[in-house]
Image (spheres, coloured by chain):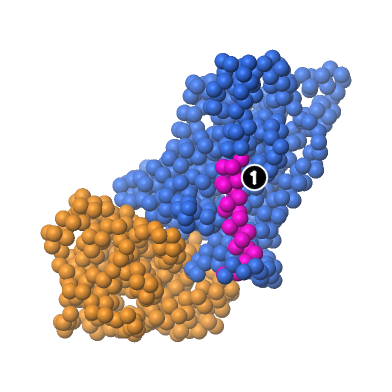
Amino acid sequence: MQEKKLSRRDILQGTAALAAGTLFASPLRAQAPEPVAITPALVEAAKKEGKLTFYSSMDLPVGEKLGKAFEAAYPGITIQIERSGSERLFQRVDQEFGSNIRAADVINTSDASHIITWKRKGWLAPFVPEDVAKHFLAEYRDPDGMSATSRIYLSSIAYNTNLVKPEDAPKSFADLLDPKWAGKMVKGHPAYSGTIMTATFQMVRELGWDYLEKLSKQRVMQVQSSTDPPKKLSLGERAVMADGNEYGVVLLKEAGQPVEPIYPAEGAPTISGPTAIFASAPHPNAGRLFQAWFHTRETQQFFTDYTAQYSAHAQVQSKPGRRKISDIKLMKEDAQGVEKMAEEIKTRYARLFRV
Amino acid sequence: MTAITTTDTPKRHLDLTRPVLWLFATFMILLIVLPLSWLVLFAFTDKTRRPTLQNFVTLFTDPAFLDPLWTTAIIATTSAVICCLVAAPIGWLVSRTDMPGRQIIRALVTASFVTPPFLGAVAWELLAAPNSGMLNQLYRYLTGAEDPLFDIYSLTGLIFVISCYTFPFVFVLVANALDNMPGELEDASAILGGKAWTTARRVTIPLALPALVAGALIAFLQAMTLFGSPAILALPAGFHTMTTKIWSLFQYPPKLELAAAAAVPLLLLTILLLQGQKFLLGRRGFSVVGGKYGPPRPVEMGGWRWAALAFCLIVLLNPVFLPYFALLNAAFSPNATTLATPSTATLHNIVFVFTELSSTQLALKNTVILGASTATVGTILALVVAYVTTRRVIASHRLLGFLATAPVAVPGIVLGVGLFLSYTRPPFVLYGTLWILLLAFLTINLPSAYQQLQAAFATIHPELEDASRILGATRLQSLWRITAPLLRTGVIATWCFIFIGVMRELSAAIVLFTSQTKVLSVLIYDLNESGDLAAISVLGIAMLVITFAVVLAVNRIPMFGGGAGARLRNS
């Protein structure tokens, strides 16, 4: 588990150093297992199982693209992707485990605090892919080898360029409180989306509940998943996105849609999406193969290029022409803080926004 | 009615009715009482299962609960009234007049019934979202106005969309009642000098009234317990209904006690309504089918025929033409609410749904399996219960009738929880299998299937069976030879009704599904939450095609008389 000196260390440390440090400070700390490379034996064993069920909160076309790439890399293994908001996946996993159902093999959540809960309950299987051990900063892997951060991304604001002139566009979260945006904004829901839960925590920490209370008076259109606001924005349903996936906005912009991301002056909430294998996985070898493959340099590079997210893999380069995460002012992640505050966020948010 | 073993020995009078019936009664009790008991237990206890009324105190002192209750009452009442106002005239026009295109109108009403309400809600998002909705875009283009014409994300919008997909329930009942009404009664009235309005007031309306009241009741209950449309439209509009509120109580950490308690007001309201229906209809008999009757004579409308047709078509614009157009457009458009032109049309969405979306095939398969099996089991069950209650075969027929109607009072989502609680622990561990969904769909569809078959039985006078029995046949023989043929249409209609009901069902499935038992409705709901409108449109169209294909096929099965569907058409 010796780390190299990483060139991107500075960049990444800014994003979520606090987060991971506390996230993995579990009392159950033990030694992570030896790193595992993708061996023919592992591939063989995975092919024998032939199937993989992957719970994920990734934007659907993005997730399915990842799945197809895995199926192409290892013919004979089919992957079924269960896409839903992370908070809903969290509830479903709880419900399924409560009834002794073990359908999920691997899960990628956008609320890193979920890993803390699952780990505490002993539901996760330790597994450390070689690439994770060699090329991931300590902040982005569980010391006990229970998970690795597969993607880093932002929740931002954004606007529709057909409806708003660049000079009129909001520059900060504070600008969203301007009465001129009343009835013109869309945002995701923290009780549904892990991204929004994580982002809401950071906004409450930096801007206070007071800010959200004022925002709730702006007649904001409330959707569920953080992947929805960019789509509502590009349809022109609302002029401004108050929160939601920045990568969705970037992808739509690259596809020629009239959307433009804004990196708020207060800093953009940062979200890391860890992936873990369940100890009860019905297809454990396929799960390990997927986990190892997902965190290789090649996959991470492909994933980053294709999805406009950021990678914790030290060797992955950002796609030319895209904004580098080091150039963006970020809010710090704090998974443990989210875990403590999730219930309060859900309750107070529902009271403020009435849904 | 398959347990016919005594056809050739009328003398022995071996009557299997009772044991068969008791078997059904036991099954019904398991099916309905078990989950309901769990619900009641949870509503009246705390986390340690100690008796308490605290859940209700919480419920009735918190505006966060009272507001949705009030909203739901408004939605259900308004929708039921709208449904009756729309369905009764269309039913009459189609059944009793010489309006042109009656078959087409019937088919189109069937199409609105077949359309799952959540799919309709998504289609109306495409049409009438305040800014991106196609109708609003058109309106702005034509008038240069700034403000939208429609806002589907509002209470009015929600009531409108719910009514679009609830009115067929009323239509089916009213049109069937009018179809089965003997023309002689109206003729007699006319011969005796009754003017058109007198005949309508003294004969037609009283005979159709039970169907209309039953329809209004079903519409009210449907609107009250619907989950999909409110979940899709109310959240962006910033309010809750009871079902979405109950759903939100399942968020982690789940508050099952409150959810169960929140179902109680809905349950009480339904019992009240059922009592009200009984009171309204009194004890008058409405059997009119006694042996032969003549076909009803169509009312000649003269020049009004075309106006009537135009009225029907304008109404049907809302549940069928416009939404289907919006879905088709979105399926081929690169941007869901932009009009696809030959140069911009794309197959990308279709390719995505059928080659990349990994849940498609599984969900399709599960849905069709569940649809067919639920429809078959449900029809048999409803048939038996309807027979027992209309003919009062056993002493406890009232109880059976109540059991078959009771689930209507329980929102699908709450029933889902009841089933979840019942079948996640020994001796019945069914969660995670298709069986639990089968039970859920069966329970949910039983009330309307039962109502439908009961109405069918009610129009067949027991004298026909009595005559057969006096001549020496057993009860089952009379049923098979006399009643069954008369019921054919009703049975086929009920089977289709349940099959469609399963396709439409979302509220219980959303609690009970797992990744391996996912159904289309859940898949579409998930896609809506992430805003993948184009994929929904493709899946929705696929779903409609399957439903129409199955319903058409069933109506052509020779065993059921092939042309039995003729009564559904205008002959």
Element marked by disc 1? helix
Direction right: furthest residue: B193
Is B46 contained in the magenta span?
Answer: yes
Count of numbered circles in the view: 1
Q: Nearer the viewer, residue B332 or A141?
A: A141
Q: Is residue A221 visible?
A: no
Label 1 belongs to which residue? B403
Give me the residue at 45% from left, 80% from top.
Answer: A340
Give me the residue at 65% from left, 67% from top.
Answer: B51
Task: Considering the whole magenta stretch, tell me its main secondary structure.
Answer: helix
x, y percent for residue B493:
57, 31
Q: Quadrant of the C terminus of chain A?
A: bottom right
- The reply, left or right, for residue B11 in relation to residue B434 is right
- The reply, left or right, for residue B123 in relation to residue B461 is left
Q: Is residue A25 above or below residue B365?
A: below
Q: Nearer the viewer, residue A265 or A101?
A: A101
Quarter where residue B86 is shown: top right
Give me the residue at 72% from left, 24% from top.
Answer: B461
Give me the residue at 59% from left, 73% from top.
Answer: A351
- Colour displayed for chain B in the image of the structure: blue
**What is the magenta range?**
B25-47
- Colour displayed for chain A in the image of the structure: orange
Badge 1: how crowded within 10 Å, few (<14), some, or many (20+)? Answer: many
x, y percent for residue A53:
32, 57
Q: Amino acid at mark 1?
A: Leu
x, y percent for residue B464:
70, 20
- The reply, left or right, for residue B472 in relation to residue A275 is right
Q: Chain of mark 1?
A: B
